Amino acid sequence: MSKELVFGHQSPDTDAIVAAKALSYLENKLGHDTEAVALGEPNEETKFVLDHFNEPAPRVITKAAPEVDSVMLVDHNEPQQSVSDIADVTVSTVVDHHRISGFNTAQPLFYRAEPLGCCSTVIYKMFKENDVEIPAKLAGLMLSAIISDTLLLKSPTTTPTDVAVVKDLAKIADVDYESYGLDMLKAGTNLASKSEKELIDADAKSFEMAGTTVRVAQINTVDLPEVFDRQAALEAAAKAENDADGYDLFLILATNILDSNSELLVVGAPTEPVEKAFGKKLANNRLSLPGVVSRKKQVVPQLTDAFNA
Amino acid sequence: MSKELVFGHQSPDTDAIVAAKALSYLENKLGHDTEAVALGEPNEETKFVLDHFNEPAPRVITKAAPEVDSVMLVDHNEPQQSVSDIADVTVSTVVDHHRISGFNTAQPLFYRAEPLGCCSTVIYKMFKENDVEIPAKLAGLMLSAIISDTLLLKSPTTTPTDVAVVKDLAKIADVDYESYGLDMLKAGTNLASKSEKELIDADAKSFEMAGTTVRVAQINTVDLPEVFDRQAALEAAAKAENDADGYDLFLILATNILDSNSELLVVGAPTEPVEKAFGKKLANNRLSLPGVVSRKKQVVPQLTDAFNA
């Protein structure tokens, strides 16, 4: 088998970067030749994680086909979230924890998805099944990914498996996961130094919903008013991306990670399915979403249903 | 969790029936409430297997939604191969060994596919990972499914894992898998008693290829001339199904399981991609395909490529 690249989704978050490193490590132990890469630079939170564990950032690629025939995807499967030339390579392996949408192959493949809080939790199970030991540093990285995806095990995406795995990884990495986790999440909410474009690009994903292209960005914060002081500029940045990239609708989910409430800012059209999805009317282009912290579980399915109704 | 149904594809073969029984057994051991059902009656080979191990045939369903909210798929994922109302239920779990095509979900799910020779081989691995013992009778059934899918480990879809698993299951079931396997495969080739419609329906799957609906039936035999003595009647039966069910192209792959050669009979249009896929011209609506035994590995990808070229 020739070399394969392993990578997570565009606008990588901590799990996208770490899951690629973890799967690549496991596959290499099992005799494959892989390299973990990324489809973008690490965000603030991920930089904090990589610094903390003294781990280099992965090489960033924009195309895969010039380098390899075959790739492994982690933490995503939808083609519009993947490398730009995904259609030109064979996907041999997917490890994920999302819905499956628009993902088609010509050949049988290895596909492992579980409805768990984090892709790194699925990969932890694969280490156990294959009897491969997780080194302390990698355990620290995987722990960080789970804390990131589950907002310190508070998101409704959190499963008992995620909790048990975090505790085991914390032992291996010798980390107090609660105090470390809070520091890590706060490191990701340093918003003042960023432009509005950076804020809406840092953790954004595109979804096809009944023919409409919906972009959903999430901004974690410890202070929602600090985000909405910049509402007009955020709307202008989102409108510019709608125009440039052909999104119909740009949704900015600002989430207070301390009290687990969100505020949704809506730019573009149609807005009716958004109002229907959450059963409330937009006011000043915003919807208040108390208790909502998970794009995957509390936003995308509701929107998908509303668009398909 | 309320009860879920577990089933394989339409026109079930031995793996479709057995994998459903095996996954249902495993899931129930893990605390879920499932029932293995089927989307059609067992074929001759499967009847031989069920009789041999004194196992009842599964209940046949035509719709899932009147009974359950949620289902588990084995040995398939493509919606047109599944239960007719698949769009009206949630797919919670898929265990498969095929390409992924046209399969989309609104929610994260459990999806386990590996490029192995048989879905029952994947399920064997899941038993091991979950430390659940395989009872002797179920081991005999799973062994039969692997022998069926790999034509006694001779098909190019066979992997070293399939070989090792067959040997372990043969020990658990206390079966001489080589002599049993040959008897079983021969039991599936009793063609004289069947109508042409029965022959082309027994193991047939539909595929979307660049907007064309292609039906591919496989008939196993120990005597190819016996099949083609009935060529005119087979063509008439295929044409009738094209007209009734909207297939553009009906391919009948007749495979000699003793010497691993096939002859392809083509009914409908366009025929050019079929000729291109195998690099030879039709003669008397037929193509000779020496060494071809696997629809999945030696027919469908080649056709898909030719249609998409």
Image (cartoon, coloured by chain):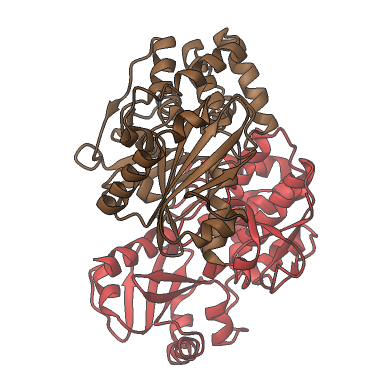
Chain colours: A brown, B red
Q: x, y (%) of residue B237? A: 50, 89
In the rendered image, which quarter contains the C terminus of chain A? bottom right
Q: x, y (%) of residue B241? A: 50, 87
In the picture, measured across the screen, residue B17 lies left or right of residue A208, that is right
Q: Nearer the viewer, residue A253 or B82?
A: A253
Which residue, as the protein is rendered here, is positioned at the far left? A66
In the picture, measured across the screen, residue A265 lies left or right of residue A63, that is right
Q: x, y (%) of residue B284? A: 31, 87
Q: How many marks?
A: 0
- Residue B96, visible in the rendered structure: no
In the picture, measured across the screen, residue A143 lies left or right of residue B51, that is left
- Residue A105, visible in the rendered structure: yes
The answer to whether A197 is drawn above or below residue B39 in the figure is above
In the rendered image, which quarter contains the N terminus of chain A? top left
The answer to whether B265 is drawn above or below residue A172 in the figure is below
Q: Quadrant of residue B4?
A: bottom right
Residue beneath the point at 39% across and 64% down: B300
Residue beneath the point at 38% across and 74% down: B263
Q: Quadrant of residue A129?
A: top right
Residue beneath the point at 53% across and 24% down: A222
In the picture, measured across the screen, residue A56 lies left or right of residue A220, that is left
Q: Nearer the viewer, residue B252 or A155?
A: A155
The answer to whether A51 is drawn above or below residue B84 in the figure is above
Q: Nearer the viewer, residue A195 or B71?
A: A195
Residue beneath the point at 68% across and 70% down: B42
Q: x, y (%) of residue B231? A: 43, 87
